């Protein structure tokens, strides 16, 4: 194979459980010389991230399921085949309206290091046992700061 080429098959690589979801690293920032991080995420209904900005761009492709994406002041519904590209520094969050599977690319890389610190190693390639306690958003905010991700508390319903 060509030097520095990267191949990952289903079930390969690191995976983390976080916010009741499964976050699988398809290409880490170390594997791409910092150019990008690519993640496959399986997230149950209602378990999206708090509002946040990234130090680079985020591109999201919906493989399965549905979600409601909040980008700046707009709300957009998405389903299989929907694609979202969020520019650097744009406040965004999404809410899965069903269990959703996403392919997410962050440029430049480093996002995988946030997930490694904020999550826990996945014991299996499936959704974790659902937690009864609410997410520790203050902890996520602190970890995010170390990775250039600016998170905010969840908005009131």
Image (tube, grey):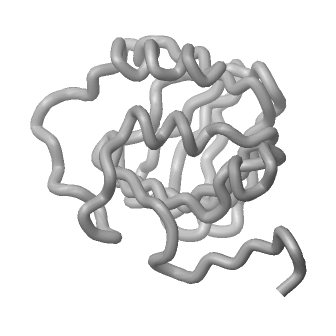
The residue shown at (45%, 77%) is 11
Q: Is residue 109 left or right of residue 154?
A: right
Q: Is residue 74 left or right of residue 45?
A: right
Residue 98 appears in view: no
Residue 91 appears in view: yes
Image: 13 above or below 156: below
Q: Which corner quadrant of the image does residue 9 belong to?
A: bottom right
Residue 73 is situated, as x and y percent measured from the top left of the image, at: 69, 19
The residue shown at (77%, 19%) is 89
Q: Quadrant of the C terminus?
A: top left
Residue 115 is situated, as x and y percent measured from the top left of the image, at: 48, 40
Q: Which corner quadrant of the image does residue 142 belong to?
A: top left
The residue shown at (62%, 39%) is 111
Q: Is residue 94 left or right of residue 106?
A: left
Q: Quadrant of the N terminus?
A: bottom right
Residue 104 is situated, as x and y percent measured from the top left of the image, at: 65, 53
Residue 95 is situated, as x and y percent measured from the top left of the image, at: 47, 40
Image: 8 above or below 126: below
Most distant residue in the right direction = 2
Image: 30 above or below 7: above
């Amino acid at each position: 194979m060509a030097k520095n080429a990267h191949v990952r098959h289903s079930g390969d690589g690191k995976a983390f459980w976080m916010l009741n979801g499964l976050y699988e690293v398809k290409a880490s920032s170390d594997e791409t010389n910092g150019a990008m991080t690519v993640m496959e995420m399986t997230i149950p209904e209602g378990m999206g991230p708090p509002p946040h900005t990234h130090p680079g761009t985020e591109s999201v492709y919906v493989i399965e399921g549905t979600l409601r994406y909040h980008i700046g002041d707009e709300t957009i519904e998405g389903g299989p085949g929907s694609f979202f590209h969020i520019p650097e520094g744009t406040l965004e969050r999404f809410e899965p309206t069903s269990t959703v599977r996403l392919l997410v690319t962050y440029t430049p890389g480093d996002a995988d290091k946030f997930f490694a610190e904020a999550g826990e190693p996945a014991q299996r390639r499936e959704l974790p046992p659902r937690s009864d306690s609410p997410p520790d958003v203050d902890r996520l905010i602190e970890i995010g700061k170390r990775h250039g991700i600016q998170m905010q508390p969840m908005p009131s319903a």
